[in-house]
Amino acid sequence: MVSLVGRPNVGKSSLLNRVLGSKVSIVSRRPQTTWREIDGIYTDDSAQLVIVDSPGLHKRKERFLSKVANQSARGAGNGADIICQVIDSRYWRDEDQNVLEHFLDREVPLWLILNKVDLFDSSDEILPRIESVKEKYTWDQIVPVSARSGYNCEYLASLLGRAVPTGQAGYSPETLTNTSPRFLAAELIREQVFRQMGDEIPYCTGVDLVVFKQHADGLIEIDAEIFCETAGQKAAIIGSKGARLKSIGSAARKQISIVFESPVRLSQRVKVKKGWASDRRALASLGYGSR
């Protein structure tokens, strides 16, 4: 098992999706889009890896939802054979140092993954960055990658495959995640809310699938509730004459259809649930706080 750890917004989820060649973990420009650990299953001719995407580790004290995500981030690495700390290769920030210090006591190899190297003006800038981060810690491996372009991602997977202990494969070669289809579909809808709303909508916007049914003919039927905490947030998600909600639904339907390789019928509505992000039971019912 390989754990991807790091501060928010360094591209852990994008890296997992790129290595797998399929979306199993949602992505947006907003920090802390990932709220719980997501397992991706990578299989090639020589190895099978369970790659765990974790929420970004941070020190901010917020409502219970944020605490749940942070607990998941702090627990990342438990049982891992290799821990990969992912950073934005352009910077080493205090938050990166905090992540490193949190995982120093783990008695497993600690790798550093320099993501976003495609953002350098020249490839000549990569080597100096590698030399710079060597001063932070004696990493077992340092690998520059770009989740966006795919640079070195296949190489990273092959390195990991050679480094993990040998054993029996736990999943069929076709399996890409052990996340439930229902949870993944809800996450894909939440992804579109975050992508299309940006900073208009706060962190605590959730999705509950009242109906998730896979019919014999392949059709996936979904009835989704998008919930927020105020009437103003609800109005913003719905948009003028329902245009924003329609756009969210259209994009989510397309993504779900691609991921599940099936036609999708999606209905959705927006509800106000004041204080839900501080409600332990509400979070647990949506799959957050436990795996």
Image (spheres, rainbow, N blue to C red):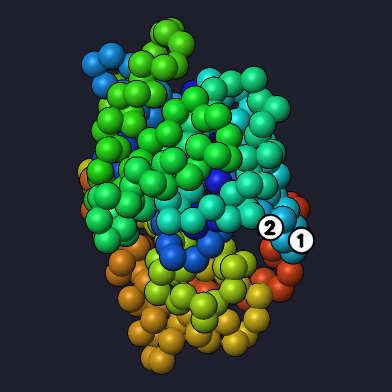
Can residue 179 be seen here? The reply is no
x 49%, y 66%: residue? 30
Q: Quadrant of the C terminus?
A: top right
Rendered position, 226 above or below 20 = below
Between discs 2 and 1, the one toward the N terminus: 1
Q: Residue 169 in the image: x percent, y percent?
A: 39, 13
Mark identifier at residue 287: none
Residue bearing mark 2:
66
x 50%, y 85%: residue? 236
Secondary structure category for the residue under label 2: helix
Q: Amino acid at mark 1?
A: Lys
x 60%, y 87%: residue? 232
Q: Amino acid at mark 2?
A: Ser
Rendered position, 21 above or below 159 = below
Q: Nearer the viewer, residue 265 or 67?
A: 67
Q: Residue 165 in the image: x percent, y percent?
A: 46, 11
In space, the residues marked 2 and 1 are separated at their CA atoms by 8 Å
x 52%, y 86%: residue? 235
Q: Residue 284 in the image: x percent, y percent?
A: 67, 48
Task: State if disc 1 and disc 2 touch (CB < 8 Å).
Answer: yes
Can residue 229 be seen here? The reply is yes
Left or right of 28 on screen, residue 64: right
Residue bearing mark 1:
61
Secondary structure category for the residue under label 1: loop
Q: Nearer the viewer, residue 244 or 198?
A: 198
Q: Tally the marks.
A: 2
Q: Nearer the viewer, residue 39 or 60?
A: 60
Number of other residues with Cα within 10 Å of mark 2, as a class: few under 14, some 14 to 19, many 20 or more? many
Left or right of 174 on screen, residue 286: right
Number of other residues with Cα within 10 Å of mark 1, as a class: few under 14, some 14 to 19, many 20 or more? few
